[in-house]
Image (spheres, rainbow, N blue to C red):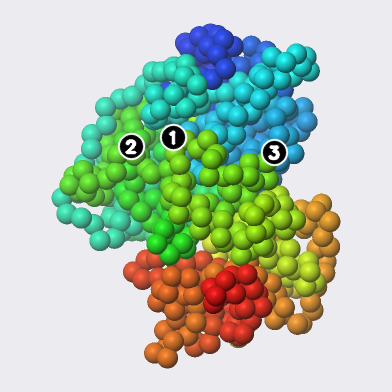
Amino acid sequence: MTLKAKELKKHRISLPIYTARDIIIKEVKENPCVVIVGETGSGKTTQIPQYLLESGLAAHGTISVTQPRRVAAINLARRVAEEVGTPLGQKVGYSIRFDDSSSKDSLIKYMTDGIMLRELLSDRLLLRYSVIILDEAHERTLRTDILFGMVKGIQKQRQDLIDRGRKDIQPLKIVIMSATLDAEKFSEYFYGAKIMYISGRQFPVKILNTVEPQSDYVDSALVTAFQIHQCEAPGDILIFLTGQEEIENMEKLIEEYAIDLPPTVGKLIPCPIFAAQDTITQQKIFEPAPHGTRKVILATNIAETSITIPNIRYVIDTGCHKSRGYNAKIGIESLLVEPISKSSARQRMGRAGREAAGLCFRLYTEDSFDQLEEDAIPEIKRCNLESAILSLKATGIDDVTRFDFMDRPSKSGLLRSLEHLYALEALDDEGKLTDIGTKMAAFPVDPPYAKVLLQSDKMECTKEAIEIISLLSVDTIFAAPSSKREEANEARQKFTSLDGDHLTLLNTLRAYESVKGDRDWCRENFINSRHMRHVLDVRKQLIQFAERSGMDPKKTCGHDLEIVLKCFLAGFFQNTALLQPDGTYKSILGGLTVSVHPSSSLFGKKREAIMYDELVFTTKHFVRGVSALESNWLSQAAPKYFGQRRA
Ligand code: ADP
Ligand code: MG
């Protein structure tokens, strides 16, 4: 055994869950469903699949572990492959959207819940799998909720077939796992599943609330981190932020501030963690900080329960996270920065006390804590249900209103989504999946983007449509350091299209490719080269996908780019707004007054109609990813939608 292997084995045995190994195996063997609740870091996600593997439960199929987050799926698979002692992608693999590192022989597979749903389309009884572990069940994402209902049904179907004498079919085991969850509720839903509690280790954590509400939590997080660094005992800091942009911004701020530290104080090293990041950078967060220095981990709520980072003694909780919200009144989906729940705040605090007593700085008042919701509201109650409905319909569940949801979505939400799918021509007059809908359900993108792709095949501009969708898959390809905003804006002028952001993005990609992604060029032109590489990656995936579904991804419209915008309109007709006599824009859906975001190339411009990629609410409603339209395109783009409205 190599030294590394010995160390890993020692680590495995030292985890709190190890003492429960035999009883976990026994319960999973004896019960069809088991609910396991155990402190974050106790070893659930990395160890339980290995225990089940070691006990022979993978003899008739793969053990699948679903995760709500891609980064978590990758990280955990990498770690477990190391512990098992085989290269990633063999015995242990992962599968996430646009990236599959698993093979036919993988016995343990970490995957996002979205990928699991997609597998259901081709393997309706999930016969490839012997055990489905639904991890992080408390997160209650839309997809996990659908999975709950689906696997529950599949387990029953498989058992029925076995009872009727089918020798070729094995029972499906279901394991629900979480650090914080209403175990009784889950047990009840899963036919009275066995509940197991695994105790963890937790040292006391002292909570320090602010006395006054903070107007700028990024700024106070920064100040707090430097205070900790200069005044407190060794131990790393974990700051909870809301997204990639904020994390990158904070990373820069820390680097700038650190220059002013007195020479007697050790270095403060920012370690960001987010999805679009290469894996080597991600592995850095698990490595100890060099002697005399301190790490400050910048993370989203992925560090709450999904990934346990060692050596954290100080947590800075901004009290916010980003969540996909759904404005029920007008039916527009948007990403919102929102207050977390009490249960999230407690989890965040807990991260400071894994290895020793710690401190948790809450950048909000005690009163604000008291006003937080006890638990987050399940996504299904807040979100756009369209992907979910398509998946359900494609898996043969036609009457979605009667699906066995753990928490039923509102009837009006369901109906509105059904209407949108009808307008997208995914459903027919009877609510049955059309050919278009069937294709859309199999696409790895949300229904409106799927519609754009299908339309582009018809209108012969698949190349451009795929490129623009890839470009929209990252937050932004432009870098805009606050100190050089003017220079950055000037550089961008070169790529700007009068028609707006979709074509501006396309121009930028073309320019980037003409210099073969040269890094100096990127720097001079304020292009985020890492994001650009991610765009190329997504494009590659989409091209493969298009080929597999019988489309020709090389079809191009040449210089006649108006066609591409019309294709986007076929998917995004709901995301449109018309210029008003007073110079503002009014959204077609819901009649909101919306403003073009300052980051858009149409900022400050007046065009008769606009289409946008997303709506964000900060101080007011902003639209991002905006292009100009001619208003007479609208009825052509979605006859069902606009015809229906006029009638
Ligand atoms: P749980 O699922 O109960 O929260 P995990 O199984 O994810 O716990 O983690 C168990 C332990 O493994 C934790 O102490 C964590 O720090 C460690 N660990 C997980 N991933 C890695 C990694 N990539 N590198 C080093 N340690 C890791
Ligand atoms: Mg876990």
Q: Are marks 3 and 2 in contact (CB under 8 Å)?
A: no
Residue at (20% x, 55% y) in the render: 213
Badge 2 or badge 1: first in the primary sequence: 1
Badge 1 or badge 3: first in the primary sequence: 3
| Mark 2 nearby-residue class (10 Å; few <14, some 14–19, many ≥20) | some
Q: Are marks 2 and 1 in contact (CB under 8 Å)?
A: yes
Q: Which residue matches tag 3?
A: 119
Towards the viewer: 571 or 531: 571
Q: Whole-Å distance between the Cαs marked 3 and 2? A: 32 Å
Which structural element holds mark 1?
A: helix
- The C terminus: image quadrant: bottom right
Q: Which residue matches tag 2?
A: 343
Q: Position of residue 214 (x, y in %)?
A: 23, 57
Task: Give the amino acid type for the residue marked by disc 1 in the picture.
Answer: His
Task: Give the amino acid type for the residue marked by disc 3 in the picture.
Answer: Glu
Q: Position of residue 565 (x, y in %)?
A: 66, 76
Left or right of residue 412, residue 127 in this image: right
In this view, the residue farthest toward the bottom is: 581
Up-down: is 559 above or below 295? below
Q: Is residue 277 visible?
A: no
Q: Position of residue 596 (x, y in %)?
A: 46, 77
Residue at (53% x, 87% y) in the render: 607
Mark 3, ligand 2, within 8 Å: the answer is no
Badge 3 or badge 2: first in the primary sequence: 3
- The N terminus: image quadrant: top right
Towards the viewer: 442 or 437: 437
| Mark 3 nearby-residue class (10 Å; few <14, some 14–19, many ≥20) | some
Q: Is residue 621 visible?
A: yes
Point out the frontmost of discs 3 and 2.
3
